[in-house]
């Protein structure tokens, strides 16, 4: 294990990985990475490596869960045993069950659920490597995968965290800042609708700090949002070119 | 959850809220009556019953000796679990904890943990080897909405009422002595939950209101009036303005409840 650094931010306001307080980690988004899935996406966000796959709308299983007026959204957030420093048991932990729930609830407002009654949409998220902020990167990936599956949506959902490291409000916490920082505020947003679909926090923030953190996270979301749109375009522009040849 | 409330009722509740009224006659920011009783289970090291209107929660605290986590060798351990017992509501079923009860336990856990309510440093007996483990078990006995706030209150009330064994360490052996000491408590977080119905926010939703709400938001406020935990729930959304507005309402409401309870 690495030793604990004394300070997360130096005198010049530079963070351990060389970022400024309002800077995102490098992000790579790719759509359509799993041939078998109806929609899929891969996200690298800092050292996070995350795959999301969508199947559906398809037959509901088990059948009694079917709803007569809308589709059922299911979501599974799962960490690979090798994704963290100490091996994680592959059985779903309480944390993973909670995250599956909040991620599902962050995606659901974006989907026209009433378009597909008596069906089910499955969203599977696999964390291949974790580096702080996995739930946010998962939401960004899952929303892309839903769009890739051709499911009608009001907007893409994009997520980013802000928090407090030492005494500064910072954007996009990485692993050390997440563990040793003073607060973590993950936010998911539908930018065009100005709608927050996930909001959590742990740590300790004054009301003023909280307001700053939420606004900073929203700014971060908007930056990732434009990358999301580019990633979608990139796949479908390629398809068009192939067809023309 | 299978919706028992018809669309008619949903419309009625939403229309009432538009007029700043509620199904049970409360104002938008009014809580139901809170009743707290402590020490109701003698076998438990700490216990409390909280009634929030018709919602009823019992929390039992057990304090046992165990091993610390390797990354916090000098600190005691906190474990929170919630049981939605089947007698409490037609919608609860027996069986292993589902995502609702896991979420409830984790929200209560986060409020206590992040506010540093328990002075876990004082629960250390032998660094890296032996510490006190505090088990907080939430038992929902009647579900009439807002289980989060009621459970958080009951958990805190039970912890305030909890004791742990006196002990001494002799030649590396831990010996339990007679008598007890109070579980060391540093903070008294209070969790405030709102429901969004239509475009309006109401505090302390009752069950009928929960069945028609679009989304809910909970914030735990500590003794310094800072925010120490937040959870948004349900498949709806909040605007950033609503979030900020609610953070102010939550602060005021927590202050008022803190005063009423004398915490």
Image: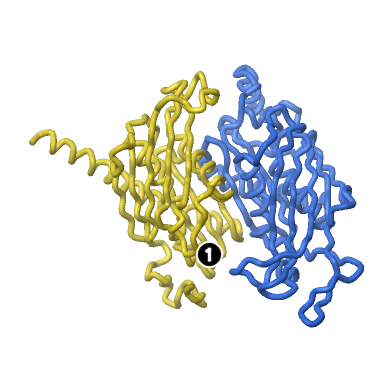
Chain colours: A yellow, B blue
Mark 1, residues whose alpha carbon is within 10 Å: few (<14), some, or many (≥20)? few
Q: Is residue B10 above or below residue A2?
A: above
Would you say B208 lies left or right of A137 here?
right
Secondary structure under tag 1 reads: helix
| Mark 1, residue position | A179
Where is residue B86 drawn, in percent x and y? 73, 33
Q: Residue B52: where, in percent of width, then height?
A: 78, 39
Q: Residue furthest left?
A: A245
The answer to which quarter of the image holds residue B217 is top right
- Residue A36 at least partly seen: yes
Residue A87 % position (x, y): 49, 60
Locate residue A20 relative to residue A98 in the image: left or right: left
Chain letter of disc 1 in the image: A
Apparent side of residue A44 relative to residue A10 in the rendered image (left or right): left
Residue in the image at 77% along x and 61% along y: B64
Depth check: B85 or B245 in front? Answer: B85
Give the image location of residue A121, x and y in percent.
Answer: 43, 31
């Amino acid at each position: 294990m690495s030793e604990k650094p004394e300070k997360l931010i130096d005198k010049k306001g530079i963070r351990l990985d060389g970022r400024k307080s309002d800077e995102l980690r490098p992000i790579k988004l790719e759509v359509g990475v799993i041939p078998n899935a109806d929609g899929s996406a891969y996200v690298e966000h800092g050292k996070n490596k995350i795959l999301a796959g969508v199947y559906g709308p398809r037959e509901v299983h088990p059948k009694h869960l079917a709803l007569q007026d809308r589709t059922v959204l299911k979501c599974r957030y799962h960490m690979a045993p090798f994704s963290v420093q100490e091996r994680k048991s592959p059985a779903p932990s309480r944390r993973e069950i909670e995250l599956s729930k909040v991620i599902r609830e962050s995606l659901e407002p974006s989907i026209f659920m009433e378009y597909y009654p008596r069906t089910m949409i499955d969203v599977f998220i696999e964390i291949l490597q974790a580096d702080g902020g996995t739930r946010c990167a998962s939401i960004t990936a899952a929303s892309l995968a839903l769009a890739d599956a051709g499911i009608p949506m009001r907007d893409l959902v994009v997520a980013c965290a802000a928090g407090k490291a030492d005494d500064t409000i910072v954007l996009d916490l990485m692993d050390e800042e997440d563990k040793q920082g003073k607060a973590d505020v993950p936010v998911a947003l539908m930018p065009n609708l100005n709608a927050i679909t996930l909001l959590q926090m742990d740590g300790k923030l004054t009301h003023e700090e909280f307001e700053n953190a939420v606004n900073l996270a929203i700014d971060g979301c908007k930056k990732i949002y434009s990358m999301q749109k580019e990633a979608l375009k990139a796949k479908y522009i390629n398809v068009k070119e192939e067809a023309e040849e | 959850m299978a919706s028992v409330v018809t669309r008619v009722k949903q419309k009625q509740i939403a229309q009432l809220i538009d007029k700043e009224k509620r199904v049970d006659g409360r104002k938008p920011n009014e809580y139901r009556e809170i009743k707290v009783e402590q020490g109701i289970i003698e076998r438990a090291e700490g216990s409390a019953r909280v009634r929030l209107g018709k919602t009823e929660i019992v929390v039992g605290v057990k304090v046992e000796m165990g091993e610390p986590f390797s990354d916090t060798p000098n600190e005691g351990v906190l474990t929170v679990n919630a049981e939605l017992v089947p007698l409490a509501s037609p919608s609860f079923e027996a069986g292993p904890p589902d995502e609702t009860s896991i979420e409830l336990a984790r929200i209560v856990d986060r409020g206590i943990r992040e506010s540093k309510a328990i002075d876990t440093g004082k629960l250390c007996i032998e660094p890296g080897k032996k510490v006190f483990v505090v088990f907080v078990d939430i038992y929902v006995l009647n579900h009439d909405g807002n289980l989060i706030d009621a459970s958080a209150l009951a958990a805190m009330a039970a912890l305030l009422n909890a004791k742990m064994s006196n002990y001494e360490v002799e030649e590396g052996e831990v010996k339990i002595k007679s008598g007890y000491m109070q579980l060391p408590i540093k903070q008294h977080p209070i969790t405030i939950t709102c429901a969004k119905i239509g475009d309006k926010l109401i505090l302390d939703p009752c069950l009928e209101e929960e069945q028609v709400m679009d989304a809910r938001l909970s914030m735990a406020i500590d003794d310094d009036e800072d925010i120490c935990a937040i959870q948004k729930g349900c498949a709806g959304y909040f605007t950033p303005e609503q979030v900020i507005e609610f953070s102010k309402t939550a602060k005021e409401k927590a202050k008022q409840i803190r005063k009423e309870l004398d915490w």
